[in-house]
Image: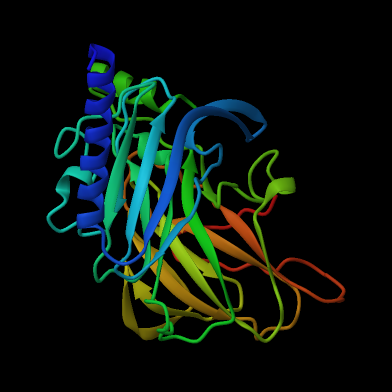
Amino acid sequence: MGAREKSSLAVFLGFLFTFSLLLCMAKGDVHAYTLVLQETEFERLCEKKSILVANGSFPGPTLWAHQGDTLVVTVVNNGNYGVTIHWHGARQMGNPWHDGPEYVTQCPIQPKQNFTQTVLLDKEEGTLWWHAHSDWSRASVHGALIIYPKPGNEHPYKHDAEQTIILGEWYEKNLTEMVINAMRTGGDVNTSVAYTINGQPGDFYQCSKESTFRMVVDPGKTYLLRITSAIMNEEMFFGIANHTLTLVGMDGAYLEQVNTSYIMIAPGQTMDVLVTTDQEPSRYYMLGSPFVDTQAPTDRTTPSAILHYNGGYQLLHILIYTLPAGQIRIC
Ligand SMILES: [Cu+2]
């Protein structure tokens, strides 16, 4: 056997070993996903800017599985610096090597390299999320991870449809340069210039009205909102004008239901909320409002989306709502 054949055999045996190892570790169904990280240009607040995102979208793709399944995720880093991906809320028992925190359990995946991560789901059920775990890359590289009940089992809270809602932020400057600059000067990292709902700031920011996120609903139905806060530092109030929110889950587990007119969600948290479209068919603002308890510079702006009822009706105005920590400015 020549040197070339020997090395091919070694590669093949290595592949076989890795694959068998994955099969031994895997439980439930196995879902294969690929996340390609790449600097991509977006236009927000009247300006174009490149940010690192997964699979060309901000926020990144929603991944899903059933309780107890295994994800095999190949992360391809086409960005300019090393990054890891973390599976927020997945306990990864016995498998910390694929959990993501940079320099804690994993080395960063270097530019032009890829790494296949195995995510062993166990008892988690509901909504979790995944995000980059290197400096502030989490602000632009993130997405939801939905874990449905095992096949044949029903979600304990009846609903007709579901919608993923990701609260995020938009920064004016390059995230990596911001962090490097803060470390050099000892100052704070710049605050965001907008909050976003599913990647869009909403009606109360410049050049944003055309792209405000709309959730189109039918009257008389119950929707499950899978809400994730990908915001870096601020807690956020969130509510929908005239609608009651029923909290039924948090951080990948169910809760006994709680009715409320708004929630307060912390960075990294997920909340599953039911909303019934029992109001007059119209359009209602879904609003965020940061909890501000400091004199320090803070982004105090107001992100919005629209709950848009289907059907023919005369629209007088979009119904607005005031949340505890924010005054709403109408542009
Ligand atoms: Cu996390």
**x and y percent of residue 281 in the render?**
76, 79
Most foreground residue, 94 or 210 = 94
Q: Is residue 103 above or below residue 185?
A: below
Seen at 59% across and 81% down, the residue is 160
Left or right: residue 197 versus residue 256 is: right
**x and y percent of residue 148 in the render?**
41, 72
Q: Which colour scheme is used?
A: rainbow
Q: Quadrant of residue 283?
A: bottom right
Count of labels shown? 0
Q: Is residue 98 above or below residue 314?
A: above
**x and y percent of residue 315 in the render?**
83, 70
Is any part of residue 234 visible from this angle? no
Q: Is residue 106 above or below residue 26?
A: above
Q: Which residue lies furthest to the front in this view?
A: 1
**x and y percent of residue 321 in the render?**
59, 68
Is any part of residue 109 visible from this angle? yes
Q: Is residue 251 above or below residue 221?
A: above
Seen at 64% across and 84% down, the residue is 221
| Quarter in which the N terminus is drawn | top left
Seen at 52% across and 69% down, the residue is 239
Most foreground residue, 298 or 50 = 50
Q: Quadrant of residue 270?
A: bottom left
Most foreground residue, 280 or 69 = 69
Q: Quadrant of residue 133?
A: top left
Left or right: residue 136 versus residue 324 is: left
Seen at 28% across and 53% down, the residue is 119
Most foreground residue, 32 or 88 = 32
